[in-house]
Amino acid sequence: QKEVEQNSGPLSVPEGAIASLNCTYSDRGSQSFFWYRQYSGKSPELIMFIYSNGDKEDGRFTAQLNKASQYVSLLIRDSQPSDSATYLCAVNMEYGNKLVFGAGTILRVKS
Amino acid sequence: EADIYQTPRYLVIGTGKKITLECSQTMGHDKMYWYQQDPGMELHLIHYSYGVNSTEKGDLSSESTVSRIRTEHFPLTLESARPSHTSQYLCASSPGASRNTIYFGEGSWLTVV
């Protein structure tokens, strides 16, 4: 089992819809969780982090964390073609205090 | 916004040449990292450092080496480049606090011909 798992996609959504990206992780002791966006040929950029169970909203983005289910998600409301990118989930593992990245989910927003 | 700089951004080099990819950060971060990523593929951690004179190998075996003589500087060296080293190399840093937010540089694209 991978430490951080994401569906590779592509996830295709129409413009204006809600895109839902999911991530599961193996280390129950993990305390901090991150979402990065990576455009083709570019480096990853941090878009959100979440530390506590529940929802965290930032503009059109909402991160959701459920530690009991070891599950973190990212919702993108009113999706735009410019949101088309690969979204990387990253989890700070308790053991080794290291950040582990998932393989990423490709999102395509169609206009 | 992170202040982490990589040079060169793009490099085409012949087989057998020695190359050094430079990475500098101005944030005073303790932790620095090198990731390797082929187009459309996963990030792979190849080296990391927790501070001056500390270097560790990452999850993916790499023929490259790193050094950390100064906090702000974390260069990566390939003694003899091969076509299999063609890839994007991403440098990153983090404050080293428990929550470990990582910030990436813009990357160095290496092509070995």
Image (cartoon, coloured by chain):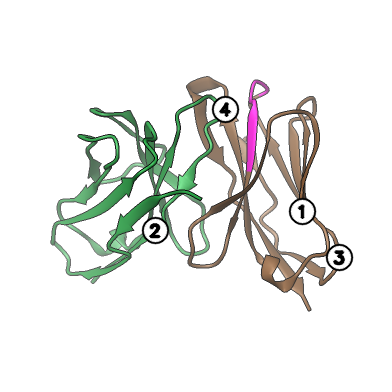
Chain colours: A brown, B green
Badge 1 element: loop
N-terminal of the pair, mark 1 or mark 3, is 3
Q: Amino acid at mark 1?
A: Gly
User: Looking at the image, do the residues carrying marks 3 and 4 touch, with CB atoms under 8 Å apart?
Assistant: no
- Whether A16 is drawn above or below B52: the answer is below
- Whether B100 is drawn above or below B93: the answer is above
- The quadrant in which the N terminus of chain A is found is top right
Alpha carbon separation for disc pair 2 and 3: 32 Å
Q: Residue A6: horizontal and vertical position, in percent? A: 67, 47
Q: Are marks 3 and 4 on the same chain?
A: yes
Q: Residue B37: horizontal and vertical position, in percent? A: 44, 55
Residue that carries the numbered disc 4 in the rendered image: A93
Label drawn at residue A59: 1
* Chain letter of disc 1 in the image: A
Extent of the magenta region: A28-34
Badge 4 element: strand
Return the residue nearer the eye: A55 or B79. Answer: A55
Q: Is residue A30 magenta?
A: yes
Q: Are marks 1 and 3 on the same chain?
A: yes
Q: Amino acid at mark 4?
A: Met
Residue that carries the numbered disc 3 in the rendered image: A17
Badge 2 element: loop
Mark toward the viewer: 4 or 2: 2
Look at 78% across and 56% down and name the residue there: A60
Alpha carbon separation for disc pair 4 and 2: 25 Å
Alpha carbon separation for disc pair 3 and 4: 32 Å
Badge 3 element: loop
Look at 79% across and 79% down and name the residue there: A111
